[in-house]
Amino acid sequence: MANKSSTSETPIENQVASHVLRNTLRVKRGENVAIETWPHTMAYATAFVFEARRLGAHPLLLVEDEATFWKSADELPAQALGVVGSHEWALLSKTHAYVFLQGPADRTQFRSLSDKKRMALTAYNHEWYARAEKAHLRGARMFLASVGENQAKNFGVDEAGWRTELTEATLVDPKGMVREGRRIAEAFRRGKKVTIDHPNGTHLELRLKGRRPDVDDGVVGPEDIAAGHNMTPVPSGVASVTVDETFAEGLVRANRPSYLQGLPAEGGEWTFRGGRLVDFRYGSGGEQFSKPFAAAPKGRDQPAFLSIGLNPRLHHAPQMEDQERGVVCVAVGGNHWQGGANKCPFLSWLAIGECNVRVDGKPLLRAGEIA
């Protein structure tokens, strides 16, 4: 009898784990791998443990219990939440690769918490990422952990179809995204003027400032570590650059939803004049943009960044709209976190597929295909 060794007979969780460890994080024999999980993603977490051992690495599994998390959020004071002990900081300093299967599973309940409570629960975030960067840790944030019944209902998508799309996009061979990401990044780095057009009426002109582009191409390599981009979303696939914050002229009409505040906003239309967003409207879900925009400080209406998606297997997945291959995202608000000059805490975006993009008059995208 033949051995059962084909990929099709390997559980999908193990296929995902093997791909991420080998191709995204490039885990080597003898390295330390930490896997952080919640109960709803335990099947993936244990697959990561097994596949790390198969590679000769040393896995360590960290589990946050959902019921205890909600009991703590309900009953304990803010100062007892979102605190990291010295033993966890020590773990980060000795970890080579980190897999984050985020939670809690009930994102609707999490969004219903007060801003103060949510900030208390995630107060450690900035220091965690700073320490991870200092340790040169290679990390993957797994968006498959977001899939669930209540999330699918909020987003208006089929849960099974959503999971399938994210799985296929996760398993994409990164070689093509690496190649196309470099091509787009070089155009962004050298270019001065960007023009975006679409038959739906979109015509927008932006300017570039020679800033270093960022590329999430499915691999956390030495260049990413050197640049401080040691954590990547999985699925991956986007090339982006901050733009000149003082210049934007024209109109953008989205033909993809933007998932803002955890909910979809569709039919977005933005008008720019004199480097400012001067008018906006949405077909549905516009309050996800208008309410935080109204409350935001100076800088909320400036162009922030431009991105082009690279992943050929993403088409409808919520919160992945910027990573669909050939989709252009235009953002307004703060971009200081990506090397820009605007420190405004507000950020939002529109996504346009099948459009034409020219950099200094040379085609970069033709109807969404990379030229």
Image (spheres, rainbow, N blue to C red):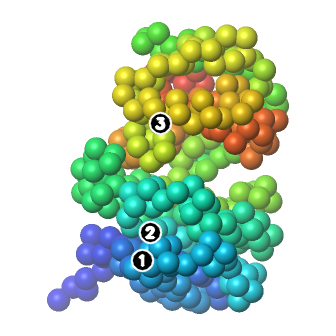
Q: Write down the quadrant of residue 83 in the picture.
A: bottom right
Q: Which mark is residue 104?
A: 2
- Identify which residue, 226 or 268, lies in the foreground: 268
Please give the name of the residue rendered at 53% of the width and 84% of the height, measured from the top-left corner.
62
Q: Which mark is residue 288?
A: 3
Q: Write down the quadrant of residue 163 in the picture.
A: bottom left
Specify whether 158 is left or right of 277: left
User: Which residue lies under the disc numbered 1?
Assistant: 66
- Identify which residue, 65 or 175, lies in the foreground: 65
The x and y percentages for residue 55 are 53, 84
- Identify which residue, 7 or 167, lies in the foreground: 167
Measure the C-alpha gap from mark 3 to mark 2: 22 Å
Q: Earlier in the sequence, mark 3 or mark 1?
A: 1
Q: Earlier in the sequence, mark 3 or mark 2?
A: 2
- Under mark 1, the amino acid is Glu
Please give the name of the residue rendered at 26% of the width and 75% of the height, measured from the top-left corner.
9
